[in-house]
Image: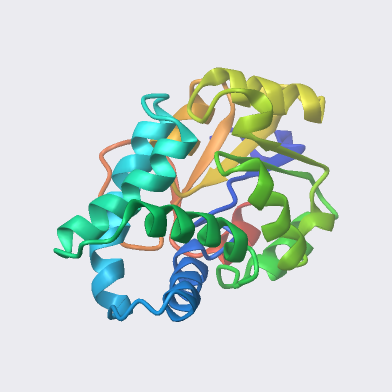
């Protein structure tokens, strides 16, 4: 990574990096199951759902499925894995409710506000996210972090998803900054880190769970570590 003194702009991923997606998602499903009178242990559902959701997001990121396919299939496959017969109409209702209620829960990754407060006086801060346009801004508004960011780029606005170079180029142009003066921070090695590095940006991999990666990249396990680097 270049000397941080060369950096003027810091780009963050949103879900799993600043916004605590797993916690907020679990609370959303808990609320929906109560509303829909679905008697299903939340932890059993999440154990099946999380890897299935990850698989479908990868397909979505690779432009292999649509947003609508993602929303339905991840739930349908989860209920099948749990040997539950859930009508398609109910699945679509759960899918709609999930998008409706997800942004009403707004837990952040630990030290998010502290880090943003420390970095904002020194850098222009930005968001690049693959999340859906209709919910990402609500997440940021609800968790009271929108005001920290100069620009917000999501994949639906850019027309492509990370790691496609076009979304990074879109965000850099919007921010009016050159790649070499920018750094990307995110939890996805493929989408955030490799996507940014391929554009000539700097990158930091946020990986809370210890993991050995045989690549010469900068890694952090806690957001607060950014205040020691930047």
Q: Is residue 32 left or right of residue 137?
A: left
Where residue 159 sits: x, y (%)? 61, 23
Q: Name the residue rendered at 40%, 62% in the picture.
A: 208
Q: Name the residue rendered at 62%, 37% in the picture.
A: 183
Q: Is residue 129 left or right of residue 121?
A: left
Residue 223 in sight here? yes
Quarter of the view holding residue 199: top right
> Vertical placement of 29 versus 56: above or below?
below
Quarter of the view holding residue 128: top right
> Vertical placement of 50 versus 74: above or below?
below
Residue 193 in sight here? no
Name the foreground residue: 3 vs 42.
42
Where residue 26 sits: x, y (%)? 43, 71
The mark tally for this picture is 0
Name the foreground residue: 182 vs 28.
28
- Colouring style: rainbow
Name the foreground residue: 145 vs 51.
51
Quarter of the view holding residue 44: bottom left
Q: Is residue 198 left or right of residue 179?
A: left
Where residue 141 sits: x, y (%)? 77, 61
Where residue 21 sits: x, y (%)? 50, 62
> Vertical placement of 125 versus 22: above or below?
above
Q: Name the residue rendered at 44%, 77% in the picture.
A: 30
> Vertical placement of 92 versus 114: above or below?
above
């Amino acid at each position: 990574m270049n000397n941080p003194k060369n950096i003027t702009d810091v780009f963050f991923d949103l879900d799993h990096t600043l916004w605590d997606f797993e916690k907020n998602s679990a609370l959303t499903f808990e609320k929906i199951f109560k509303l829909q009178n679905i008697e299903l242990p939340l932890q059993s559902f999440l154990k099946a759902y999380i890897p299935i959701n990850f698989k479908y997001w990868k397909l979505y990121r690779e432009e292999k499925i649509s947003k609508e396919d993602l929303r339905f299939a991840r739930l349908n496959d989860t209920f099948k894995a749990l040997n539950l017969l859930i009508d398609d109409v109910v699945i679509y209702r759960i899918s709609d409710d999930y998008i409706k209620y997800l942004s009403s829960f707004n837990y952040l990754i630990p030290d998010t506000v502290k880090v943003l407060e420390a970095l904002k006086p020194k850098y222009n801060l930005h968001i690049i996210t693959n999340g859906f346009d209709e919910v990402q801004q609500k997440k940021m508004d609800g968790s009271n972090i929108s005001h920290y960011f100069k620009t917000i780029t999501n994949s639906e606005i850019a027309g492509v998803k990370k790691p496609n170079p076009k979304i990074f180029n879109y965000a850099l142009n919007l921010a009016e900054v050159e790649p070499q003066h920018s750094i990307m921070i995110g939890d996805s090695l493929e989408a955030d880190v490799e996507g940014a590095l391929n554009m000539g940006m700097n990158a930091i991999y946020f990986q809370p769970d210890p993991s050995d990666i045989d690549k010469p990249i900068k890694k952090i396990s806690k957001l607060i570590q950014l205040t020691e680097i930047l």
